[in-house]
Image: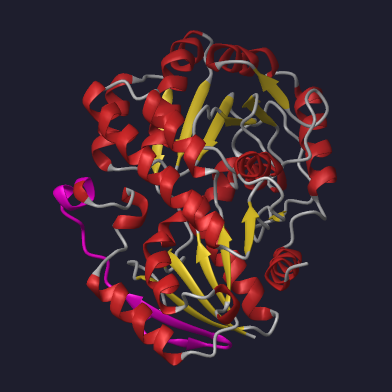
């Protein structure tokens, strides 16, 4: 099988959920024997170079140049797709389409939506074109509308609402055009089915390729610390974090508890939140994530916005950190409240919940042991590759 894989960017290095999911699926399908040509933007720090070959994978990468704000505002495409709609990537796509012989063309997330029109122009008749597969990382229409509506700045909110309308149009066009659609959680599948009843939409949750901690006992040896791991480059993630910290930081400070935020963010954002919050430490990007998690008692998922599957939850589980989260923020996970996770209705309740259990070692250890046992054999990448091949083959 020959597959043309259109993605936002080279997934290496894999420092956020989108890159981990894309990279894991590319690896899994390549290891299954499929020949895959990947078209996307270059990224700093990646070992791949344009036209590299790696076993059954070939990389067709172009430098990603920043788009002018006016171009994004005037573009018919939403920002997430417009930023890849560059002459360099268009030429790479045309070269791959000229080669012909493709069995399948994969659109890896809505960011690859810039390529939908050129592909449909090249293959105007459904019966004579490769199978088209749309891999959804979120139900973007509902997610982008939620984020836009809740942005505190009126001007920014207006811009985001306009972009959300573009997202809705493009996402619906991609689902209509695709021969197969995959969703990252059952909840997202149900949202797609509400708009496109009768479609066969496969659910492919992410796999896990990180460290497994076989045994761990949480005790007084660890600081009274909770951690939040993530990438905070996207506005939705920053909104989640700031809103949670506004509720949690004063409570933590008054109860001699620590909160550590681990992950990438713009330096301007880090400077702002470091000035604002006293009980919270912001590490920025780190190389020793597992070591930092071993020095904490609790992991948090305080996300009202962001949708989809939270890959950091797998890091928490397999590093044996008990998880406290907002209700609805751990979609796609087989965890149950009070058994393998603790769930809370809002930010203040979540922060108070941390303080209630942070010294209850028996309960914390029960949560981490149950979550590990439930998930231990459910998240290997090889099975995700088989699921994707089954979705490509169709009914």
* Image quarter in which the N terminus is found: bottom right
**Part of the protein shown in magenta:** 49-73
Residue 174 appears left or right of 93: right
Residue drawn at (69%, 56%) of the image: 204
Residue 309 is situated, as x and y percent measured from the top left of the image, at 61, 44
Residue 30, relative to residue 165: is it above or below?
A: below
Query: Which residue is drawn at the image coordinates 68% and 58% (left, top)?
Result: 207
- Asked whether 68 falls inside the magenta stretch, the response is yes
Q: Position of residue 130 (x, y in %)?
A: 57, 79
Determine which quarter of the picture holds residue 233.
top left
Note whether residue 253 is visible: yes
Q: Residue at x 41, y 35 (%)?
A: 236
Decide if residue 260 is on the left or right side of residue 155: right
Residue 46 belongs to the span the image colors magenta: no
Percent x, y of residue 258: 51, 23
Where on the picture, by quarter, is residue 355? top right
Residue 264 shows up from this direction? no
Q: In the rendered image, which quarter contains the C terminus?
A: bottom right
Looking at the image, which is closer to me, 76 or 85? 76
Kindly identify the residue that appears in the image at 55 percent across and 43 percent down: 139
Count of marks placed on residues: 0
Q: In the image, 243: left or right of 379?
A: left
Relative placement, left or right, of 384 versus 246 is: right
The color scheme shown is secondary structure
Q: Position of residue 219 (x, y in %)?
A: 72, 29
Q: Is 392 above or below relative to 228? A: below
On screen, residue 135 above or below 313: below
């Amino acid at each position: 099988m020959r597959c043309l894989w259109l993605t936002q960017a080279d997934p290496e290095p894999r420092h956020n959920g989108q890159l981990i999911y894309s990279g894991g699926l590319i690896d899994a399908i390549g290891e299954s024997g499929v020949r895959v040509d990947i078209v996307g933007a270059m990224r700093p720090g990646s070992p791949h170079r344009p036209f590299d070959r790696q076993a059954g994978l070939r990389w067709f990468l172009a430098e990603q140049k920043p788009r002018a704000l006016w171009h994004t505002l005037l573009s018919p495409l939403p920002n997430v797709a417009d930023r890849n709609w560059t002459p360099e990537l268009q030429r790479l796509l045309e070269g791959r389409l000229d080669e012909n012989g493709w069995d399948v063309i994969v659109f890896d997330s809505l960011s690859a939506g810039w390529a939908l029109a050129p592909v449909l122009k090249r293959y105007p008749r459904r019966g004579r074109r490769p199978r088209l597969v749309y891999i959804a990382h979120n139900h973007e229409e509902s997610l982008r509308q939620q984020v836009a509506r809740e942005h505190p700045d009126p001007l920014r909110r207006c811009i985001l609402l306009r972009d959300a309308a573009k997202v809705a149009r493009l996402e619906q066009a991609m689902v209509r055009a695709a021969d197969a659609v995959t969703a990252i959680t059952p909840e997202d599948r149900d949202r797609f089915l509400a708009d496109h009843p009768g479609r066969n939409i496969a659910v492919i949750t992410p796999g896990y390729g990180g460290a497994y901690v076989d045994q761990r006992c949480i005790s007084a040896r660890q600081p009274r610390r909770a951690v939040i791991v993530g990438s905070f480059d996207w506005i939705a993630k920053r909104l989640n974090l700031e809103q949670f910290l506004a509720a949690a930081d004063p409570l933590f400070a008054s109860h001699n508890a620590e909160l550590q935020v681990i992950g990438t963010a713009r330096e301007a954002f880090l400077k702002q939140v470091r000035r604002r919050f006293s009980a919270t430490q912001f590490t920025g990007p780190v190389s020793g994530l597992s070591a930092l998690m071993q020095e904490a008692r609790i992991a948090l998922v305080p996300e009202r916005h962001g949708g989809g599957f939270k890959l950091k939850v797998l890091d928490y589980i397999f590093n044996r950190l008990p998880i406290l989260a907002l209700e609805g923020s751990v979609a796609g996970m087989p965890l149950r409240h009070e058994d393998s996770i603790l769930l809370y209705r809002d930010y203040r309740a979540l922060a108070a919940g941390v303080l209630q259990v942070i010294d209850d070692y028996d309960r914390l250890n029960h949560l981490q042991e149950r979550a590990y046992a439930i998930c231990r054999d459910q998240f290997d990448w090889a099975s995700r590759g088989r699921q994707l091949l089954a979705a490509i083959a169709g009914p």
